[in-house]
Amino acid sequence: MNDLYVTCEDIISDIDFKTVRDWKDRTGGKAVGYFPVYAPAEIIHAAGMLPVGLAGAGDRLDIQHADARFGSFICSIVKTTLELGMTDHLAAFDALLFTSICDSARNLCYVMQRNFPEKYVDFLHLPHNPSSPAAAEFLASEYRRLSARLEELGGEPYDEVAVLHAIESFNENRALTRSLCDWRAERPHLMKASELYALVRAGNYLPVEQHTEMLVAAGAEFEGRAAKARDSIRVVVEGAFCEQPPIDVVRIIEQAGCYVVDDDLTIGRRWFTEDISTDGDPMMALAQAYLDKSVYSSVRHDFRKPRSQGLVEKVRNRKADAVIMLVAKFCEPAYFDYVLFKQELEKEGIPHLLIEFEEKLFTFENLRMEVETFAESLLFA
Amino acid sequence: MVDWYQKLAESAETGTPPAASMMVSGACVELTQAFDVLPLYPEVNALQLAIRRQSLEPILAAEEFGYASDNCAYVKADIGAYFKGITPTGSPLPKPALVLCNFVGCNTYVKWFEHVSVIMEAPLYVLDVPFLRAGEPSADAIAYVVRQLKELVVKLEEITGKQLDMDKLREAVWCSSQVEEYWSKIKHLARRSPSPFDAYFDAITLMGPLYVHRATREGVAFFKQALEELELKAELDREAGVRERFRLVFEGPPPYPHFRAFRDMFAKWNACAVASTYSTVGGLWEFGARHDPDNPFESIALHMIEHNVTNRNMQQRNEQIKRYVEEWDADGVIIHFVKSCRLFSAGQGDMREYFSRTLGVPTLYVESDLADPRYFSTAQLQTRVDAYFEALEMHKSARTSAHVG
Ligand code: SF4
Ligand code: SF4
């Protein structure tokens, strides 16, 4: 494996957040961790702080304390995030930000607030009614509130130009990410899903400009690759928008006979379908983009367009043969969406396989067999 | 409630009055009342099926359809019952003219109503209510909800072919304010010792009318009478020297399929709930909030954002329970973890930590479910409850002797 991907895998599996601590040492700035899926990183960046996308602890932490606080029937990421806090792994973060993705994440926000009173812990309400003309103004007011709180925390005072620049930097990063995803969908035999995943997710922990350089380097390296395509089915992986599966799960899906042509892993890093406008009030531009230009996701509600339609379009656009529903155990938004996704996929004649995962405790061999059987049934049908 | 089910059956047969599906929590029933639109509460259906022990069959049907064993069992009971043609009373339920998702805290609401809308092919409107973060909602949050309420008015005008009658809306809001006053007084009766009613197990019988009839004159009369009866009972209990042995605060919804058995576990110890968070799902009024007929839209918005437990954060819920313990003079807290309901249950272990460790309030934490009968283990629960009361007894006598000494 190329050095770049080794670096990325190291970064994403580091629960001591060395990149974040180094950045803080270098700049003297503050770091804001945000719980998946999406957060307006531009605003944090413009305040001179480092936005960091949290993603649980994977299999690198034994849960000693968090089980007693969150009990049964709650997904892993909620517990491992709390465990990270209780074992001092989140010491580098001056603030923690949560959004309205689900009830477990929301309650975690306030459990964090109670247990870590020294941190600024806040909750952004991302609107569930984008059809209302009032939604954009409300969301912009949320963003302004965040910006003011960051300033109180010692961030740079609100500066429209700084936010516009931040939007430009993130636009560039997202555009590159989108083009790598397109490139991968065209030539999945040249770019492993696990590579793209590690590369994109590494952006959660780095300053955006640095990550953009990585994406550029990766793009150039991909262009030089050559290999023969194997017999594999083309799949869309859907459902791991928040809690992330062990990277080996992604590898096994590929090794077992699938080309992953699209997925929603770390979807927050490619949340927008096009560039966010850099005209006018940047807070309104960010809000409007959230409402009208973001991808469908199980935690973003927009009843103007069913999410199942978004999934079917993705399958068609990527010329995929099937969908692998990769769902975190106890993730209620994913469980609910599965019901309507399943109906729609069946109606459209698109085969699917449902896999549940947890951050830890994964029976890889069963998974390999299941995916192999699924892929073979389609290849030799 | 019988009357309400009758009206729903009429609506199912004739199409009038039209019905709107709504969620109990933060329901803007004043607005539907102003249009004579019948509220239809899927949660109440699910609850009725569960308490009548009819929820398992629909839950299994929903799981067959694709729902996970860990999805909220209320949703599965409701949707499964629709598939199976089961209703709580046996009489038909109308197809909603509008599926109105008043999103108040619970993310499952959005999913549930989206599914209802797809499955029943009925139009959906999501009224998005910003979660309560700080002590009071921001002006932006209130403005956002008010504007959506006005969008909703247009929808209701379309459905009913009527214009909004502001006097009628004010009247509905006034009725709610009166009901809230009576209900709040009822809640405060439980501060007496002995409490004339159980604010968890008995409160549930008053919660249905609160959601269905709150904005009507019948509702006002009903709650006035309920208050009078309970005041009388309080007086009689006092004279007869009735005493409760333990005063408790309950957190979380009850296990409806095993309601009786669960209740008996506490009755055995002559324990009485003097307050509960569950009884504030529809509205939190015992601390003074009321609808305001002079500001109908703003006060409906405030009720949705601020004055119901589901839209308030965990720290605020802790604070609410703490006030109950102190002001309602309770001996302990019972946390009923409901596997279905992450809104209530996610993080309840931390709440236990807060009450038992930080505040030193004896706290019991038990797990089961509110609609799925498969998650209730009588023997295990009884053992836990008994052990809790034995310890509580010791705690109380230690406290009393310390006090006397
Ligand atoms: S994995 Fe699912 S249930 Fe867990 S926090 Fe994320 S969205 Fe919520
Ligand atoms: S999750 Fe809880 S509040 Fe939400 S619908 Fe289910 S039982 Fe009700």
Image (cartoon, grey):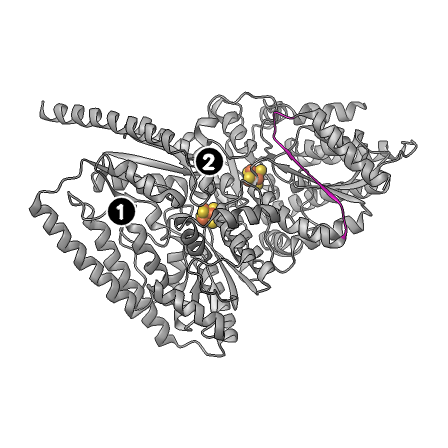
Disc 2 marks a residue whose amino acid type is Tyr
- Residue annotated with mark 2: A120
> Is A132 colored magenta in this rendering?
no
Q: Is residue A288 in sight in this rendering?
A: yes
Where is residue B209 drawn, in percent x and y? Answer: 33, 60
Give the chain of mark 2: A
Any mark on residue B199, and which? 1
Q: Is residue A248 above or below residue A105?
A: above
Left or right position of B122 against B263: right
Same chain, labels 2 and 1: no
Disc 1 marks a residue whose amino acid type is Ala
Q: Is residue B90 above or below residue B373?
A: below
Q: Is residue A291 above or below residue A42?
A: below
Q: Decide which of A212, A129 is in the foreground and name it.
A: A129
Estimate how packed mark 2 is, as few (under 14), some (14 to 19) or many (20 or more) residues with alpha carbons within 10 Å: some
First to last magenta residue range: A349-362
What's the residue at 53%, 54% (across, down)? B79
Give the chain of mark 1: B
Q: Is residue A40 in sight in this rendering?
A: no
Where is residue A350 drawn, in percent x and y? Answer: 76, 49
> Is A350 colored magenta in this rendering?
yes
Which-is-in-front pick, marks 2 and 1? Answer: 1
Local secondary structure at mark 1: loop
Estimate how packed mark 1 is, as few (under 14), some (14 to 19) or many (20 or more) residues with alpha carbons within 10 Å: many
Image quarter where the C terminus of chain A lies is top right
Q: Decide which of B45, A219 is in the foreground and name it.
A: B45
Left or right position of B57 against B399: right
Where is residue B246 drawn, in percent x and y? Answer: 21, 35
Left or right position of B209 against A111: left
What's the residue at 60%, 28% (across, down)? A27
